[in-house]
Image (cartoon, rainbow, N blue to C red):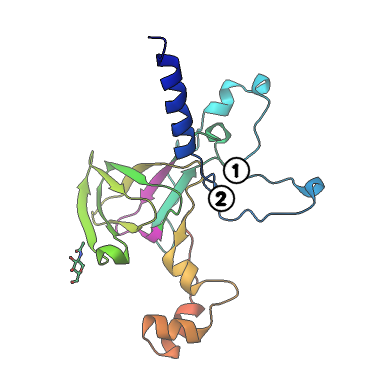
Amino acid sequence: MKFLPISLLILALATATAFAYDPSPLQDICVAIKDPNSAVFVNGQFCKDPKQATADDFVFMGFRNPGNTANPLGSKVTPATVMEFPGLNTLGISMARLDFAPGGLNPPHTHPRGTEVLVVVEGTLLVGFVTSNQLNNTFFSKVLYKGDVFVFPIGLIHFQLNTGKTPALAFSGLSSQNPGVITIANSVFGAKPPISADVLTKAFQVDKKVVDYLQAQFWYDNN
Ligand SMILES: *[C@@H]1O[C@H](CO)[C@@H](O)[C@H](O)[C@H]1NC(C)=O
């Protein structure tokens, strides 16, 4: 028995070594600065004095009303990330409410910092994601009905389309306080300033006319 604490200590040290790595990014960018006096940003959010916290910090009421789907995509994502729901800070979790008009689309996008698990509450959704190049860009897709749950693995491109004749409603949980959203079309064709047509004509194997057309579109952001 007297050797047990020592073996526990060794185990603890080994574990500490095994898990000693850089912290995960909690936002898109966090550029280092040399002057600590202007260091007003952190990787994530500042913490409120715990003595000042109230029950209101731990409630989010933004899901009570449907999102407005009267837009070019016919969908609206209402996020409940640390930006809208400060009580989530440091907890590694967030949510979203997804409203769809009939035919509404949440277009192909990725969450660079979070896996998403989605439950359909009303209606019918065609959903899918595509694996990375290493797994040959395999497309996994399902039609989901009320009560069905689907998972979109972290970082992979995915979408949801309302294939029903009625509005659809879904809720998602995401494994980051700030999962981030990269909408593919908006990022590639709506970048400001624009990505050079030389890059996009080669990348998409199309004429410059097509690239010009796509870059001239208004890429609505439903988030
Ligand atoms: C991807 O494609 C290659 C070449 O056809 C094949 O050898 C490999 O098994 C495929 N991998 C998967 C995960 O499908």
* Left or right placement of residue 88 versus residue 149 in this view: right
**Residue at disc 1, secondary structure:** loop
* Residue 92 visible in the current orientation: no
Q: Which quadrant would residue 46 be assigned to in this image? A: top right
Q: Which mark is residue 5?
A: none
Q: Which residue is located at x 58 percent, y 25 percent?
A: 56
Three-letter code, disc 2: Gln
Q: Quadrant of the N terminus?
A: top left
Q: Which quadrant would residue 141 be assigned to in this image? A: bottom left
Q: Which residue is located at x 36 percent, y 46 percent?
A: 116
* Left or right placement of residue 31 versus residue 60 in this view: right
Q: Which residue is mark 1?
A: 44
Q: Is residue 22 above or below residue 201?
A: above
Q: Which residue is located at x 56 percent, y 35 percent?
A: 89
Q: Which residue is located at x 33 percent, y 58 percent?
A: 159
Three-letter code, disc 1: Gly
Q: Is residue 89 above or below residue 141?
A: above
Q: Position of residue 109 (x, y in %)?
A: 40, 60
Q: Position of residue 103 (x, y in %)?
A: 30, 59
**Residue at disc 2, secondary structure:** loop
Q: Is residue 89 magenta?
A: no
Stretch of the chain drawn in magenta: 95-109
Label 2: how many Cα within 10 Å (few below 14, some 14–19, many 20+) = some
* Residue 78 visible in the current orientation: yes
